Image (cartoon, rainbow, N blue to C red):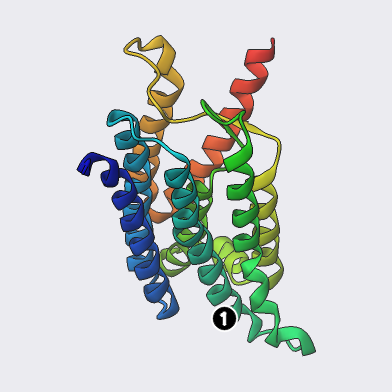
Amino acid sequence: MNIKAYIPNGITLLNLLCGCIALVFASHRNFEMALVFVCLGIFLDFFDGFFARLFKVSGPLGVQLDSLADMVTSGAVPGLVLYQMMIDTSTSMELSYTQWFPYLGFIVTLGSCYRLAKFNIDTRQTESFIGLPTPANALFILSLPLVLRDTDSIFVLELLTTPAFLLVIALLSAYMLNAEIPLFSLKIKSSRFKDNALQIGFLLTSVLLLLFFQYLGIPLLIIVYILLSIFNTKRGKK
């Protein structure tokens, strides 16, 4: 029995377990612990592919397991978090559709599912991404209730408690997940700094944003990631 062949899939299943635990925390509105377990799941998601390539045991089963695990960790969890936020904002809406309005938060889950299915059959996404990766979108969504909890900004507070704004976030997330927008990968391509300058620069920027802005730094770094990718694509076409 080749034990090495089971290690990558075992790591993927641990990612799925983290997603399940995050769902429980999110359902109890413990968004901080939900974010912790989603981050742990994303960390494991990076290493399952790494060990599959290291041990040369990549296969179709691992590909399918990876997407199924991501569907929970980076698809169902952010959908539930946005649902919870929409429940809070819909109480201020004096309209007949307030009971079903929060379910629109699961538009994020639907968009994530479609994106993951496309990823499995899209041969263009071996070295980079087309559309926002589901882990990045999950981090963006899960940071929002924590930003709302800690913010001193009236502007940010009003935005994140406005039902229409949360609906726009759900719709925009689903769009960005499946948009035909090339986004760079964080994988280190070689030992030369020139080949990895974009990735290293982004990682350093991310550290600074998180240090100075705490939870607000998470959505900011996702926005920076998208803008840098667009700039890099346009520069490459010149």
- Residue shown at 62% from the left, 39% from the top: 121
Rendered position, 113 above or below 208: below
Query: Is residue 46 visible in the rendered structure shown here?
Result: yes
The type of residue carrying mark 1 is Asp
Rendered position, 152 above or below 203: below
Q: Would you call the spot at circle 1 few (<14 residues within 10 Å), some (14-19), or many (20 or more)?
A: few
Q: Nearer the viewer, residue 80 or 2?
A: 2
Q: Quadrant of residue 26?
A: bottom left
| Image coordinates for residue 139, horizontal then vertical, percent | 46, 53
In the picture, the quarter occupied by the C terminus is: top right
Q: Nearer the viewer, residue 49 or 129?
A: 49
Q: Is residue 27 left or right of residue 204?
A: right
Q: Is residue 70 left or right of residue 33?
A: right
Please give the residue where the numbered disc 1 appears in the rendered image.
88
Q: Is residue 231 left or right of residue 30?
A: right
Rendered position, 55 above or below 20: above
| Image coordinates for residue 111, horizontal then vertical, percent | 65, 56
Query: Is residue 131 visible in the rendered structure shown here?
Result: no
Q: Nearer the viewer, residue 203 or 106?
A: 106
Q: Quadrant of residue 106?
A: bottom right
- Residue shown at 31% from the left, 57% from the top: 14
| Image coordinates for residue 144, horizontal then vertical, percent | 50, 62
In the picture, the quarter occupied by the N terminus is: top left
Dot 1 lies on which element? helix
| Residue that sits furthest to the right in the current view | 96
Q: Nearer the viewer, residue 210 or 139?
A: 139
| Residue that sits furthest to the front in the current view | 1
* Number of marks in picture: 1
- Residue shown at 59% from the left, 21% from the top: 232
- Residue shown at 59% from the left, 33% from the top: 227
| Image coordinates for residue 21, horizontal then vertical, percent | 34, 69
